[in-house]
Amino acid sequence: MGRSRYQVLGSQPHFVTCSTVEWMPIFSQPELVAIALDSLQFLQVQQRLTLYSYVIMENHLHLIASAEDLSKEMGNFKSFTARSIVDWLHEEQPNSYWLARLEAAKLAHKSGQRYQLWQEGSHPQMISSEDMLRQKLEYIHNNPVKRGYVDDPAHWRYSSYRNYMGEVGLLPVTIL
């Protein structure tokens, strides 16, 4: 994530946002959400990332996460998911609108690649207090409600809200 001016300090939990280029609604396709979820779960199983909370929206995701090197792990996540999503699109929708848009959105200095899925950086904010933690958890879990997609955060499938209600979610999380 070399170009980001944001710094991750230590291995404390951070609030992280990753957005698609041009805010493309790539994650409106469940198969592509599954790639992001599988990648996060892989990082958890490998003990490279501790996930405390998440929400995946159609064009961005928010996490509260920690890692020994969170910037590196987020870079790995974004690189792997971008390659996997582009590969999936080539296989399942070879002449798709999405591939053309991802190619057109590629920044000029990204000369080693044909497509770009993610905006640069992940804008990490260290969770520095209980108040900030509560505010970020509420923000993450209410994001789909605020956007008008659901009336109750428990109805948004791609979120850790259910975990915090004592139910099984799509990914395991460490409850804060």
Image (spheres, rainbow, N blue to C red):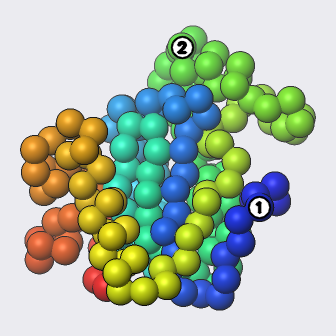
* Residue placed under numbered mark 2 in the picture: 97
Query: Which of the pair 67/135 is nearer the observer?
Result: 135
Relative side of 46 to 160, left or right: right
Residue 68: x, y in percent?
64, 85
User: For the point 15% across and 41% down, which residue is it?
Assistant: 150
Tag nearer the camera, 2 or 1: 1
User: For the point 84% across and 37% down, which residue is it?
Assistant: 110
Q: CA distance from mark 2 to mark 1?
A: 32 Å
Q: Is residue 153 visible?
A: yes
**Disc 1 element:** loop
Relative side of 98 to 141, left or right: right
Report crowding for label 2: few under 14, some 14 to 19, many 20 or more residues within 10 A (C-alpha).
Answer: few
Report crowding for label 1: few under 14, some 14 to 19, many 20 or more residues within 10 A (C-alpha).
Answer: few
Residue 149: x, y in percent?
20, 37
Residue 70: x, y in percent?
63, 74
Of the 4 image quadrants, the one containing the C terminus is: bottom left
Of the 4 image quadrants, the one containing the N terminus is: bottom right
Q: Which amino acid is tagged 1? A: Arg
Q: Quadrant of residue 138?
A: bottom left
User: For the point 69% across and 25% down, which residue is it?
Assistant: 105
Query: Which of the pair 104/82 is nearer the observer?
Result: 104
Relative side of 20 to 147, left or right: right
Task: Say the numbered circle drawn on residue 48.
Answer: none
* Residue placed under numbered mark 1 in the picture: 5
Q: Which amino acid is tagged 2? A: Tyr
